[in-house]
Amino acid sequence: MQFGTLQRPVPLNQSLEKTIMGRSRYTITEPDKPHFMTCTVIEWLPVFTRPETVQIVLDCWRYQKEHEGFQLYGYVILENHLHFIAQAKNLNKCVSSFKAYTARQIIDYLQARHVEHLLAHLRFLKQAHKTDREYQFWQEGVHAEMMFSEALMRQKLDYIHANPVKRGYVNLPEHWRYSSAANYAGLPGLIDIDPW
């Protein structure tokens, strides 16, 4: 696999800089290279404590792998955010559609089950960000970091898999159900990944 270099956009003026900074200081400049990304639920709300909401994420990735050339090298899903390493021909579009689809499906799930305490937060928090919808689910932007070396790729995979251990949820990375650590340990995972 070939690696490129990480590039950051140069703001044209102070106003534009604030807009870019509010969303993400990093852009996906070489989508055919693997990128480490983080998606965070707005205000770190604990939404992925339900297996059904995690399944929405996994089903979306599965669809993207089958239909959009999305390659998933590693992931971890925690209660309020997720990390993953992926690449695709049009990675920006994949990430954008991932966030839009999962947000809509999870909000539909919460509405169907009348989870009002979470919905009230998502409704209130959207007022600062969106005018075209009732709820805001994900924080704006994605911190995308290109994997430009084997060493960085290994470091990020280790970081992803160590997250639940560092939080004290499990003793071994492969014991966390919502992670690719099991795949790398030769055990069946919840979703097939593209092993590194």
Image (cartoon, rainbow, N blue to C red):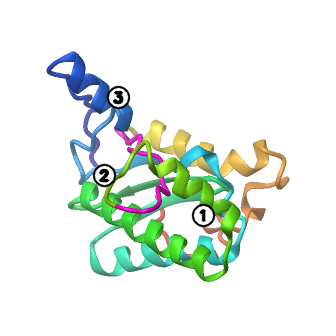
Between marks 1 and 3 in the image, the one whose residue lies nearer the viewer = 1
Residue 101 horizontal/vertical position (percent): 39, 71
Amino acid type, residue under disc 1 in the picture: Leu
Residue 192 horizontal/vertical position (percent): 51, 75
Residue behind mark 1: 119
Name the residue rendered at 55%, 56% in the picture.
122
The Cα–Cα distance between marks 3 and 2, rounded to whole angstroms, is: 31 Å
Name the residue rendered at 69%, 75% in the picture.
51
Considering depth in this image, is 18 or 116 the residue closer to the camera?
116
The Cα–Cα distance between marks 2 and 1, rounded to whole angstroms, is: 43 Å
**Which mark identifies residue 84?**
none
Badge 3: residue crowd in 10 Å (few <14, some 14–19, many ≥20): few
Considering depth in this image, is 16 or 89 the residue closer to the camera?
16
Q: Range of the magenta residues?
A: 133-148
Q: Earlier in the sequence, mark 1 or mark 3?
A: 3
Query: In screen coordinates, is 144 left or right of 114?
Result: left
Name the residue rendered at 21%, 61% in the picture.
89
Amino acid type, residue under disc 3 in the picture: Met
Residue behind mark 2: 1
Query: Which element is circle 3 on?
Result: helix
Amino acid type, residue under disc 2 in the picture: Met
Q: Earlier in the sequence, mark 3 or mark 2?
A: 2
Is 146 magenta? The answer is yes
Query: Which element is circle 1 on?
Result: helix
Is 101 magenta? The answer is no
Query: Which element is circle 2 on?
Result: loop
Name the residue rendered at 39%, 45% in the picture.
129
Residue behind mark 3: 21
